[in-house]
Amino acid sequence: MIGRLKGDWEEFKESKPGDRFKDRYHRRQQEPGHLVNRIVLVILGSILAVGSLLTAPLPGPGFATVFLGLAILAGELLPAARFLDWSEVRLRRLWQFVRDVWKTGLAGKIAVVVVAAILVGVFLYVAYLLLF
């Protein structure tokens, strides 16, 4: 089982960003599988994604488990795979932009920290409004 997981991970890493989840979806559809197994995975992924999204403001793993649920769904549902591929490309661009701003010097570092602090503050304020 661990060998299979390693192989799956290697195939996933070797796929081109923006096509990784679609490639995984197509590989999963090629595998002979039982319909019940696929239904269970869709239900599990849905519960994990939606449940994590609802409890994200609470202490704990938060949004990481939302993406885990979506990754499970992406193996069984093409729209989920397309969404994660689309998201990966945009998040990579955003991360590169933040890294470029950070490398510009002290002003860039201050700008990144200030924007991150504002985003955390807004998130906490919205979580407070939703919970209390």
Image (cartoon, rainbow, N blue to C red):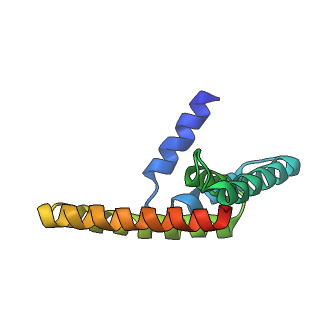
Q: In x, y percent, where is residue 81?
A: 61, 64
The residue at the point 65 percent across, 66 percent down is 130
Q: Nearer the viewer, residue 7 or 127?
A: 127
Q: In x, y percent, where is residue 1?
A: 65, 29
The residue at the point 58 percent across, 69 percent down is 83
Q: Is residue 64 visible?
A: yes
Q: Residue furthest right?
A: 36
Left or right: 105 in relation to 36: left
The residue at the point 51 percent across, 70 percent down is 86
Q: In x, y percent, where is residue 43?
A: 81, 54
Height in image: 32 above or below 126? above
The residue at the point 72 percent across, 60 percent down is 50
Q: Nearer the viewer, residue 47 or 132?
A: 132
Left or right: 29 in relation to 82: right
Q: Residue furthest left?
A: 105
Quadrant (top left, top right, bottom left, bottom right) of the C terminus: bottom right
Q: Nearer the viewer, residue 130 or 15?
A: 130
Q: In x, y percent, where is residue 17?
A: 44, 61
How many numbered discs, if any? 0
Height in image: 102 above or below 32? below
Height in image: 79 above or below 8? below
Residue 78, quarter of the rendered image: bottom right
Q: Residue furthest front?
A: 132
Left or right: 71 in relation to 102: right
Height in image: 6 above or below 119? above
Q: Nearer the viewer, residue 84 or 99?
A: 99
Residue 111, quarter of the rendered image: bottom left
